[in-house]
Amino acid sequence: MNTKQFSEALSNVNDKYINEALAPDELLQPQEEISTNDVLTAQAAPAKAAQTPKKLRTHLKVWRAIAIAACAILVIGGGLAAWAALDGASYKRADSYRDYETSGMPSYSGTTPSYNGAYDSKDGMAYEAEAAGEYEYAMDEEVSFIPNEQPAGGKDSGMTGNVITDDGAVLNPAENGLKIIYTAYINMETTQFDESVRQIEELAKKNNAYFEMAGVSSASTYYRSASYVVRVPADQLDSFLEGAQGICTVTSLQKYAEDVSERYFDVETRLETAKAKLARLRELLAAASDMQDIITLENEISSTQYQIDSLTGTLNHYDSQISYSTVSIDLREVYRVNEENAPLTFGQHITKAFKEGLAGFGNFLEGLLIFLAGNWIWLLILAAVIVVVILLIVRGRRKHRRQK
Amino acid sequence: MEDNKIIDLFFKRSEQAISELSAKYGKLCEKIARNILNNASDAEECVNDTYLGVWNSIPPNHPDSLSAYVCRIARNLSLKRYQYNTASKRNSIYDTALEELEECIASAKDVEGEVESAELTKTIEQFLDTLSERDRVIFMRRYYFSDAYADIALQTGLSEKNVSVRLTRLRSKLRNYLKERDYIV
């Protein structure tokens, strides 16, 4: 078969195929008067077929819109992801961690136990718990409740680890034989970052504290920040916290006390028992003569020894936690510290809210400017992509119009 | 004017039939002829021959669809003309001689060939039935009316590229269809 044969055979196809192909043809309406003639409109089939291209065009439009939307999402998402990746990378690069090792200080790598405020009221700690709870509540209410101008030497509130009894006498828990682990979290703001960092280090030295972790991050486009985990001797915790408040503006301070007395004494008792057991086993071993007995005793001794080691480790860990309180400090550089607030009237509240809104907007603009300055290359690329997409759309539309 | 009325005019041997036919289908015929021949004067001649062909064949024929009938005549005349043109362009005396001979042989029609051709037509029709309406229109516009891609694109609302891609798929489909039925190996 050749093309000629095929073409001839195609010539003779049924009328309906020809008419179908003809149906939407504008050639059928060569002249005005004929196009308005009822000749063609009388034919139902052409009218139906004539609608097809219109429908197709609508489909085309919808698909084009979807494609453009997908492109836009892709571009924006990609840009954001790239920005985030870049930002994260630069942040990491800018981070300069300094590790401090204090001479002669024990260094514990054990993880800090979580203090979820699990206070044990059985051991006379109810007051402590209450004090801490109250304090937290106060923090929620007003972020800037910072007893900056707390009268020196005045009565300690829940800020300190000391228990104030009903008659006002201050009890040191250590004297009562209570085993309490203190943990504190401080958020601070400063306008003079370097000075504050230096002062914190000085303060730590003065209080015989050591840094478990110290990190200063200074991403190029943002304010710097530092975070520390300081281990302060428990008896100097209060003076340390007070000193910290003197350095810069503390925006939040939380202090937790965890009573581990029960667990501590439990471990201690078990340790003593194990030690007694070991001594007894040694005596038995000395007296034993049967080989089988000796082997059994040796096994028992080694497992007891292991038990003793483990319990001693636990006790040591508790001791370190108790004797050295953990203070986590977050220091942020700002150019304007939060002002202190006395209780406000309604009008003052409104004024404050208004001012804060304005300041917030200012902060946003500032952040935006910094962001634009920091990511201008990416924004340039994004703009180029958008321009190309718009040009493509415009060209496509112009073509479409020309076809019409 | 309605097709039936034009056919009636032909049956009445009224010359108005030709002018009505020309008014309604003149452009269509011209387009078909021009697509095949790519030559204005040849196309014009073919269109006139088409009118004559219609005049000569109606009556006795009474086509159900005048448009298809006219198209078919115009196409066949254009193809014949095209073959004649290409044969003479080859400038071979042998080709021209064959052409002359063919005219005389064609009258004594080859029965076998005609049956084959009719079968092929049927196969093509079956193939067309397997297609969607849009594909059918595209196929017919391209291979029956020899329309350019751009024209088909305009008519169907697709892009030229899309039309081209669709036609490629249609061709491979046709190829498989014909292969299955042993028309090609």
Image (cartoon, helix red, strand yellow):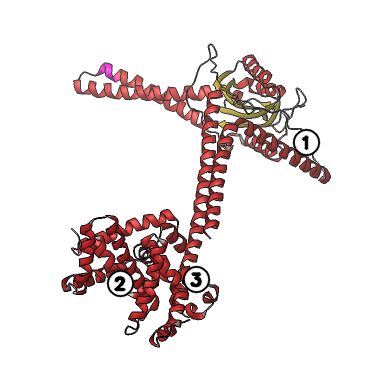
Is the same chain shared between marks 3 and 2?
Answer: yes
Of all chains, the one bearing label 3 is A
Q: Name the residue under label 3.
A: A30
Q: Is residue A7 left or right of residue A149?
A: left
Q: Mark 1 points at which residue?
A: A341
The percent coordinates of residue A179 (x first, y second) are: 55, 27
Instruction: State which region is magenta.
Output: A284-289
Of all chains, the one bearing label 1 is A
Q: Mark 2 points at which residue?
A: A13
The percent coordinates of residue A131 (x first, y second) are: 67, 35
Give the farthest residue toward the front.
B93
Question: Residue at horizontal 79%, vertical 39%?
Answer: A343
CA distance for labels 2 and 1: 93 Å
Of badges 1 and 3, nearer the viewer stands: 3
Disc 2 residue type (three-letter): Val
**Main SS of the magenta segment?**
helix
Is the same chain shared between marks 1 and 3?
Answer: yes
The percent coordinates of residue A392 (x first, y second) are: 53, 47
The part of the image, by quadrant, that contains residue A379 is top right
The part of the image, by quadrant, that contains residue B94 is bottom left
Of all chains, the one bearing label 2 is A
